[in-house]
Image (cartoon, rainbow, N blue to C red):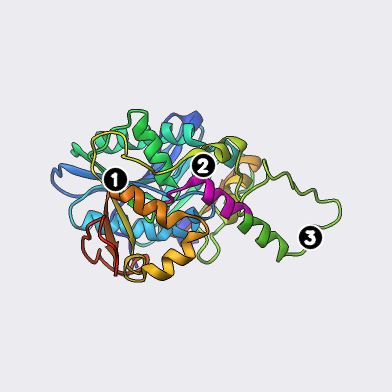
Amino acid sequence: MNAVLDASPAEVDMEQEVLVRFGSGGQLTGVLSGPSGTGPTLLLPSAGLQPRAGPFRLHVLLAQRAGGEWHPDLPL
Amino acid sequence: MSIGDWEPFWLGPSSRRLYAALHAVPGSPSTGVVLVPPLLHEMPRSRRFIAEVARELAAIGLPSLRFDFHGTGDSSGTGDELDFASMHRDLDLATTALRERTSATRLVLLAWRGSALAVRSWLGRGGMADLVVLWEPIVDGGSWLQELVQGDAGERARRPPPRAGVPRNTDRQTASLMGFPASPRLRGDLAQARLDGKAPGTAPMWALVRAEVTSRAGDLRTRAATAGQYAQFRHWCRNGCDVLPHAAGPGRGEPAGARDASGDPA
């Protein structure tokens, strides 16, 4: 939870894809997708050595379909 | 292990954004590096390693930019939109971004595996670089494609069949390869791509290969003969590149030293 509290946008995209850095020294990075404040947020942490995008890009594809997502990960 | 100071950003228009990360360096370096990731299943497997390479390059004063091709990684799009034409556009964006975001006027392209084929194609279409380094490049795209098809079939055979009612694409022309979409366009691009003859453009071209490629050439020649990769690689190197064998696998060492590309490995 501290990670979310410390999060700060790194760059905002026109289609509301926000790169967010958080954690100690901003060494962790996530992508916040979809319109803000419109409902629950889905948190998709990376699993083990899998990159932020998830296995076979599962997290990215889920974000595209769900319209809102937050998938933080190690700084890869 | 930290990968040092770096900054993620979106690259390109919002309708077609690419994930990119710049490992900047202080001062006004004249040379910068664009790291071009490998393709398909090799991309996620090497992601951390490439980030660490970027960190190491930045540590010696070379600003380094890594990115995900359209339809891969954190970039927008779907995997079936990936082909050489899309990669050409992405290489244009990435190289331009490096020049715009740093003081670098000399551009080095560092491309892994199958991306070497796309980079060569990009150079042939007028892409500009001052040095091209190919890390364990795929030399014959057609042979590699067959390896992928066979590998994919092997992976599927080892797993249980899909549940009843769950469709599975078994069309060899449109099904995924190693779990990642591979469009007929991409397959066609790969099938026709080879690193033969002299590379287009004027940039010197180096290849990084594992030390055992040169130190245990007999084994490698035997193993690679099926795919024809090794012989073609040596032919290509005699005509168009230098070879720098590196001492170990990812993250384990510096290049062991230069070797004359025409010299027969011991």
Pinpoint the chain carrying mark 3: B
- Using the image, tell me which numbered label, if any, was put on residue B190: 2
Vertical relation: B68 (above or below) A22: above
Of A10 and B174, the residue lying toward us: B174
At numbered mark 3, what does the secondary structure look like: helix, strand or loop? loop
- Residue A27: x and y, percent? 37, 58
Vertical relation: B35 (above or below) A73: above
Vertical relation: A26 (above or below) B188: below
**Residue of label 1:** B239
**Amino acid at circle 2:** Leu
Looking at the image, tell me whether mark 3 or mark 2 is earlier in sequence order. 3
Mark 1 crowd level (few <14, some 14–19, many ≥20, 10 Å Cα): some
Of B264 and B112, the residue lying toward us: B264
Residue A14 colored in magenta in the image: no
At numbered mark 1, what does the secondary structure look like: helix, strand or loop? helix
**Residue of label 3:** B161
Residue B68 placement: quadrant: top left
Residue A47 placement: quadrant: bottom right
Looking at the image, tell me whether mark 2 or mark 1 is earlier in sequence order. 2
At numbered mark 2, what does the secondary structure look like: helix, strand or loop? helix
Please identify the residue farthest to the left as the structure is shown. Answer: B27
Give the Cα distance between marks 1 and 3.
47 Å
Mark 3 crowd level (few <14, some 14–19, many ≥20, 10 Å Cα): few
**Amino acid at circle 1:** Asn
Vertical relation: A1 (above or below) B130: below
> Start and end of the magenta stretch?
B137-149
Of B232 and B63, the residue lying toward us: B232
